[in-house]
Image (cartoon, helix red, strand yellow):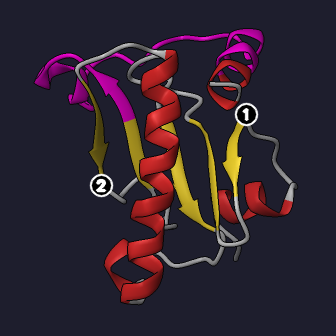
Amino acid sequence: MASLFSKIVTGEIPCHKIAESEKFLAFLDIMPLRKGHTLVIPKIEVDYIFDLDDELLAEMIVFSKHVSKKIRATFPCNRVGLSVIGLEVPHAHIHLIPINDLQDMNFMQEKCALSSDELMKIASDIRNA
């Protein structure tokens, strides 16, 4: 059965797209820790990120780097944190989160409640950065 993220790749489920290539897709997390919290996924369905072949994993990191620069240009911060947890959705993914301190990456904290309009504006701002 296709994962939630695979359905986003095929367009069955909409997303707030940030960037896309032949192999990867970046889109806003709809339950973000911070404004600008973005997910990067491979378009192929692989559950565990370290099951990706080395070349694809390296390309995913480089793709994430380009997306992180757009996030940082849109949301000034000390860093764009990168996290790989992989328990929420059985599809390899990277979290990119604008952070100013370590607490900003705490996944146990309450998530931001953003409207679809707010997410649409954030996605547009990041894409245009």
Q: Quadrant of residue 48?
A: bottom left
Name the residue: 75% across, 39% down: 15
Sequence-earlier tag: 2 or 1: 1
- Where in the figure is residue 62, as x and y percent of width and height? 43, 61
Please check the rendered image and state whether residue 104 is part of the magenta-colored stretch, yes or no: yes
Give the residue at mark 1.
Answer: 16
Q: Is residue 48 visible?
A: no
Q: Residue at x 40, y 44 (%)?
A: 95
- Residue occupying the point 49% across, 66% down: 90
Q: Give the residue pinned by disc 2.
A: 85
Residue 57 appears in the picture as rendered: yes
Q: Inspect the image, locate mark 2, and give the three-letter code of the amino acid beneath it.
A: Ile
Foreground disc of the pair 2, 1 = 1
Residue 60 % position (x, y): 47, 66
Q: Is residue 92 above or below residue 5?
A: below
Label 2 Cα neighbours within 10 Å, binned few <14 / some 14-19 / many ≥20: few
Horizontally, residue 54 falls left or right of residue 66, namely: left
In the image, taking residue 114 as reference, residue 121 lies left or right, namely right
Q: Residue furthest left?
A: 102
Viewport quadrant of the C terminus = top right
Whether the magenta-drawn stretch holds residue 113 is answered as yes
What number is the disc on residue 108?
A: none
In the picture, residue 127 is in which quadrant? top right
Task: Identify the residue at horizontal 21%, vertical 16% (top origin).
Answer: 100
* Disc 1 residue type (three-letter): His
The image shows residue 11, relative to residue 126, as above or below, that is below
